[in-house]
Image: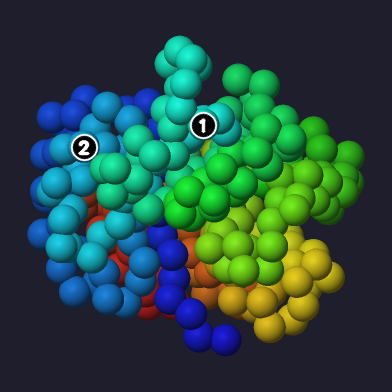
Amino acid sequence: MLKKLFIAGNWKMNKTASEAADMVSSLVDLLVGMESKAIIAVCPPFTALDRVSCILENTGIELGAQNLSDKEPGAYTGEISAGMLLDLNVKYVIVGHSERRQYYGETDQLVNAKAHMALKSGLKPIVCIGETLQEREAGKTMDVIKSQFSGSLAGISAENILNTTIAYEPVWAIGTGKNATPEQAQEVHKFTRTLLKASYGQEIAEKVIIQYGGSVKASNSRELMGMPDIDGALVGGASLDAHGFAELITNALKK
Ligand code: PEP
């Protein structure tokens, strides 16, 4: 089915607010016209959201955050609420990135609570799932995907799954320069689509966007996006440079 590619840049813990503002100003110029052909979002660190938000106003490029609290506002030192993000015109929020799972102990249960908080507040979560190298080598990829899928998306209604993006990000491909081959990625995306079908039915399953993430760059975006169940990309390192990110999107659109 025809749906717009959804390409989001995850800047991780990179760029001060000033650096982010410079980068996004260049990006806006480079992407003119492309925002109507694909959904494009940038996810800067929290400290840069306000400035980037002002620059993105009326450009058609969307703003995302990299995390949110699963709690309502209150005594949670250091946390950021859904409402704080909405106030800055944030539309998307990454939850369950493997770096949060690995370094900050985020479990499927917490990821699920964050996804529910995002959805009930009107934010669109990008829920990340993916296996480690060890799990892949042990032949457990599909088991891991199934268990993260059920745990992270538990209780999400049919209506809300349409506001949710799933990002398949094999941990061994993140920041390593070694992307999954288009065939490896397609295999997992197809399996994820089957899980969606089992939970929500065919029509909804086909509408849900499943992004691939893991060393996507300008040189491989076209072939990865050319696979039938890959609907977009979550891009880390290659989204940090305006020209490189714009080239990656241009190539992806040639799929
Ligand atoms: C990511 O951070 O989600 C990611 C996929 O990183 P990279 O593109 O650098 O592998």
In the picture, measured across the screen, residue 2 lies left or right of residue 115, that is left
In the picture, measured across the screen, residue 185 lies left or right of residue 23, that is right
Q: Which of marks 1 and 2 is nearer the N terminus?
A: 2
Q: Residue at x 21, y 37 (%)?
A: 50
* Residue linked to disc 2: 50
Q: Please tell me whether mark 2 sits on a helix, a strand or a loop.
A: helix
Against 2, residue 53 (above or below) is above
- Residue depicted at 48% across the width and 34% down the height: 68
Type of colouring? rainbow
Label number found at residue 231? none
Closer to the camera in the image, 251 or 210: 210
Residue at label 1?
Answer: 72
Residue 4, given in percent of the width and then of the height, sits at 43, 76
CA gap, disc 1 to disc 2? Answer: 21 Å
Pointer 1 with pointer 2, Cβ within 8 A: no
In the image, 130 versus 46, the foreground residue is 46
In the rendered image, which quarter contains the C terminus?
Answer: bottom left
Q: Give the amino acid type for the residue marked by disc 1 in the picture.
A: Glu
What residue sits 53% from the left and 63% below the top?
163
For disc 2, does the CB lie below 8 Å from ligand 1? no
Question: For residue 136, which quarter of the picture?
Answer: top right
